[in-house]
């Protein structure tokens, strides 16, 4: 696995290009604001985009979803529990003062906790981590995990009420902190980290 991190938008969201070792295939994860503009130079290498993965469909992470879908034709993967958030993209854009994008397309495939997706010689394990959104997922591949806004470098995702906060903390403690300490975290915002570092230094966890 080779990972290219692209930072976009005023909220500095991370879009990821996840390449196979030979760079022949790729997965695009969470295409944010103006992400397609930064992705295009990589696609000129004749890399075939196998899929578009959505950890959660808040507007800053799916702003360019339609453009990416239109230009690559790749299938979109997302958790069904987040469909209401995807449908409410205009209100979501208003909350963070983003101009609404064109209507984002719906998923082609739905995943569930424990699913394994085999693409381009890479194996992706889906870990359902509700809390930040009902359908938030983290996606493990080799020695890394793409955590969206569930767990970040020194931070955790925002929640709307105490029940969601409790759910988020349970997801993190039972499903993420149990991973090996050297697991690399590729978050939805901020720099990469590791599980071991977050155990020691993320004061929002304690």
Image (tube, rainbow, N blue to C red):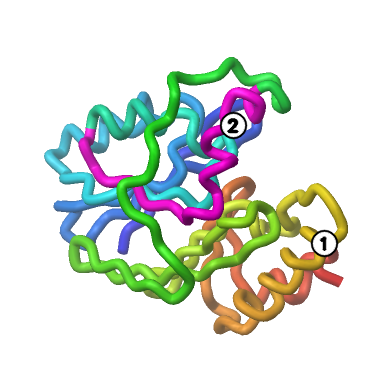
Vertical relation: 86 (above or below) 37: below
Residue drawn at (45%, 49%) of the image: 54
136 relative position to 68: left or right? right
Magenta: main secondary structure equals: helix
Report crowding for label 1: few under 14, some 14 to 19, many 20 or more residues within 10 A (C-alpha): few
Q: Nearer the viewer, residue 138 or 196?
A: 138
- The numbered disc on residue 53 is none
Vertical relation: 119 (above or below) 113: above
- Where is residue 134 shown, x and y percent of the image? 63, 56
* The magenta stretch spans residue 159: no
Residue 196 image-quadrant placement: bottom right
- Where is residue 99 shown, x and y percent of the image? 59, 15
Tell me the quarter of the image containing the C terminus: bottom right
Which region of the structure is painted magenta? 72-93
Q: Which of pointers 1 and 2 lies earlier in the amino acid sequence?
A: 2
Q: Secondary structure at mark 1?
A: helix
- The numbered disc on residue 88 is 2
Residue drawn at (49%, 29%) of the image: 63
Q: Secondary structure at mark 2?
A: loop
Tell me the quarter of the image containing the N terminus: bottom left
Q: Nearer the viewer, residue 188 or 68?
A: 68
Mark 1 lies on residue: 163
Residue drawn at (72%, 26%) of the image: 95
Report crowding for label 2: few under 14, some 14 to 19, many 20 or more residues within 10 A (C-alpha): some
Residue 91 image-quadrant placement: top right
């Amino acid at each position: 696995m080779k990972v290219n991190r692209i930072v976009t938008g005023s909220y500095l969201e991370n879009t990821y290009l996840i390449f196979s070792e030979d760079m022949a295939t790729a997965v695009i994860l969470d295409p944010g604001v103006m992400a397609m503009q930064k992705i295009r130079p990589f696609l000129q290498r004749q890399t075939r985009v196998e899929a578009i993965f959505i950890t959660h469909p808040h507007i800053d992470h799916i702003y360019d979803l339609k453009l990416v879908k239109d230009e690559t034709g790749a299938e979109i993967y997302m958790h069904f529990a987040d469909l209401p958030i995807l449908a409410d993209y205009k209100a979501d854009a208003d909350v963070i003062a983003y101009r609404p994008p064109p209507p984002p397309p719906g998923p082609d495939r739905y995943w569930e906790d424990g699913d394994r997706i085999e693409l381009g010689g890479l194996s992706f394990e889906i870990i359902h981590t509700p809390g930040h959104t009902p359908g938030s997922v983290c996606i493990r591949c080799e020695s890394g995990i793409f955590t969206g806004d569930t767990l970040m470098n020194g931070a955790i995702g925002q929640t709307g009420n105490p029940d969601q906060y409790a759910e988020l903390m349970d997801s993190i403690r039972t499903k993420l902190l149990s991973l090996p300490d050297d697991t690399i975290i590729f978050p939805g915002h901020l720099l990469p980290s590791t599980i071991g570092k977050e155990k020691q230094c993320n004061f929002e966890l304690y």
